[in-house]
Amino acid sequence: MGIFRLFELGFQTVNKRIKVAFFLWVVNLLFSVVVIAPLYFLLQKEFSRSLLGDQMAKGNDFLIWLGDFIYKSRDIYPALFGWILVPMVLYLIFNIFLDGGVIGRIAVPAEQTNLSSFLSDCGKYFFRFFRVFVISAIGYIIFFGVAFRLISAAFRLWTENASTEWPLIFASNLNFLIAVLLFSLVRMFFDYVKIRLVVEDSNKAVRATLINFSYIGKRFLRAWSLYLLIGFLVVILFIICILVHRILPEAGVFFLLVLLWQQLYIFSRMWTKMLFFSTEYHFVINHPRP
């Protein structure tokens, strides 16, 4: 089956499961509020009814405040580090939890979707997907700790004797593109491992990973082309978001319009996340192992 037909099937499935995208958006919004609230109250305490606060609200002198705050807080760096690190770890774990609900709901097209069934799938697949995450960490280390460093070293050898800045610019952009492509490869590979665990209702993450080497290896170009097609859509949505954001006025009541547009973009990210999983699910269903 061609990648455009798989894209169409994935698109249809996501729109039938649009409630899941809404659940993801609500959860991410609540998590963001919990994380940002301490910073908001800190700013209120430091700068409410102050001239610097008025200037910061207009986008001025934030760096001055940040430098001053870091200086005053130099004795509590461990606490600040924990304030940043803990939410990041929790968000990562929470996304692993949510992935179970997304793929679980996609894999049962005949069932009705509600919050209860979504959360049930989140819990059912969490430990399976967490094992996949641990295995995937090894994959990222291999690709970015070994392969990408070798590629970067080759670029440095090529540009170290450059007489103009153009080879440096070209090498830098190409290096970034390679990093993005390597990241997409690793992420795509382990997405299919998750899909397999759900489709086969298996707990064996290591076995599914090993099987996936053969499965993806035989269908690599088609699978990666499908993944990059959706990745291109993500880039287009991002560019549209930036362009619209620039033309929207931010003064007065229009601030609410900007906020609404930002939330619509975040919802689109949840939708495209589902689209990745949905097209991969249809890929596995329509290309079974012999």
Image: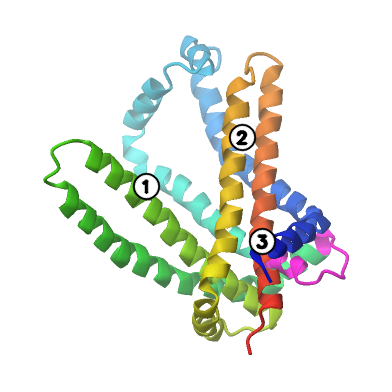
Q: CB of mark 1 within 8 Å of CB of mark 3? A: no
How many discs mark residues in the rendered view? 3
Disc 1: CA contacts within 10 A as few (<14), some (14-19) or many (>=20): few
User: For the residues marked 1 and 3, what is the alpha-carbon distance in whole angstroms?
Assistant: 30 Å
**Residue 148: where, in percent of width, then height?**
31, 61
Residue 30 appears in the picture as rendered: no
Query: Which residue in the structure is indicated by mark 1?
Result: 78
Q: Residue at x 45, y 51 (%)?
A: 85
Q: Is residue 199 left or right of residue 185?
A: right
Q: Residue at x 70, y 76 (%)?
A: 286
Residue 125 appears in the picture as rendered: yes
Tell me the kind of residue under disc 3.
Answer: Leu
Q: Residue at x 36, y 40 (%)?
A: 76
Tell me the kind of residue under disc 1.
Answer: Pro
Secondary structure type for disc 2: helix
**Residue 26: where, in percent of width, then height?**
72, 47
Of tags 2 and 3, the one toward the viewer is 2
Q: Of 89 and 197, which appears nearest the observer?
A: 197
Residue extent of the magenta highlight: 100-116
Query: Which residue in the structure is indicated by mark 3?
Result: 98
**Residue 198: where, in percent of width, then height?**
68, 76
Tell me the kind of residue under disc 2.
Answer: Ile
Query: Which residue in the structure is indicated by mark 2?
Result: 240
The earlier-in-sequence mark between 1 and 3 is 1
Q: Residue at x 66, y 71 (%)?
A: 283
Q: Of 204 and 2, which appears nearest the observer?
A: 2
Residue furthest toward the front?
2
